[in-house]
Amino acid sequence: MSAQTHTASKILELIRQDRLTEGAHLSAQKLADRLRLSRSPVNDALGLLERHGIVVRKPNRGYFLQLDHEVLARTCADLAPPAADDVVTQSYFRLADELLRGALPMQCSEALLRARYALTQAQTQALLARVAQEGWAQRRPGYGWEFSSMMTTPDSLLQSYRLRLALEPAALLEPTYRIDKAVLARCRAAERHLLDGGIDSDSADQLHERGVRFHESLVEASGNPFFIDTIKRVNRVRRLLSYRSMQDRSRYRQHCEQHLEILDLLERERNEEASQALARHLRSTLDNLARIRGILTT
């Protein structure tokens, strides 16, 4: 149930981001692509939302939204995951923090984690399922788990941004580049939400996902699967230090303004200028991260 409710919460966030109205079709495949999951957990989560009366399943047609995004926003408190999920989420951030501080061994057993964070067996499995899905832990052959050392130093985060700086601006110059107006509108709505107070009120999860969706949406419009796959892989493994960097949110207003500038240029099909603006944005982010290096190592 823990993994199911976590996925359902991600779907609710997408519904709010996209400002979907009653009757909107929720394609399981499209949701799976956006959440980087297989269709099976997405269908399980949609089934959970159906039991809450948020969506309805129509035979041979799929799932459709029953509540307008505005109504959903007002009732979301009633749809909060059960307390067990809260424990898993809290343990997730404790684990990430201890891993970054070197307070947790890079190889450990489920029993160690269960005892360390006072979890049930099901909660421990949900915790490990989440970190494995995000790409920074994997089961060891035979026994136990091993965490990735790729993203446990500040240099790793900076290196990931340098890779993105080399790839993302180039993706905007692909001859096949086409960005849908609905995607532009969705990205703009997400930036305005942040400028209207979301920078301070959103969780670390929400901030990370909004940033990821903005950059992946731009790259996806290139139609080049090599660009798309590489950027998605980078985003999966940089979560740990991204969460730590969110302790300082002062730079986010500038990020939003830069994002909106890029969207305006793309809408006017000025891709060369948009590419240059995206490169400036990533360079400024690199500079900001270098200045908060102390947060990343503390």
Image (tube, rainbow, N blue to C red):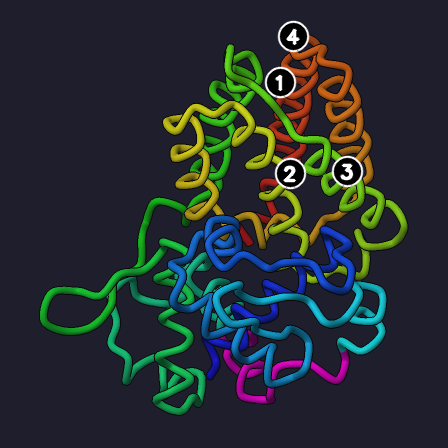
Secondary structure under tag 1 reads helix
Dot 1 or dot 3: first in sequence order is: 3
Residue at the spot of label 4: 272
Q: Which label lies toward us, 1 or 4?
A: 4
Secondary structure under tag 2 reads helix
Residue 258 drawn above or below residue 67: above
95 and 273: which is toward the camera: 273
Marks 1,3: beta carbons within 8 A: no
Choose top left, top right, bottom left or bottom right for residue 127: bottom left
Residue at the spot of label 1: 279
Q: Which label lies toward us, 2 or 1?
A: 2
Q: Is residue 7 magenta?
A: no
Label 2: how many Cα within 10 Å (few below 14, some 14–19, many 20+): some
Query: What percent of the width, then of the height, locates residue 138?
Result: 26, 61
State whether the magenta stretch is mostly helix, strand or loop: helix
Residue at the spot of label 3: 185
Residue that appears at 77% across and 64% down:
22
Amino acid marked by disc 3: Ala
Marks 2,4: beta carbons within 8 A: no
Residue at the spot of label 2: 214
Dot 2 or dot 3: first in sequence order is: 3
Amino acid marked by disc 4: Glu
How far is the residue under mark 1 from the one under mark 3? 22 Å
Label 4: how many Cα within 10 Å (few below 14, some 14–19, many 20+): some
Secondary structure under tag 3 reads helix
Please say whether residue 240 is visible from this viewpoint.
Answer: no
Amino acid marked by disc 2: Phe
How far is the residue under mark 1 from the one under mark 4? 11 Å
- Please report the bounds of the magenta region as a residue range: 77-91
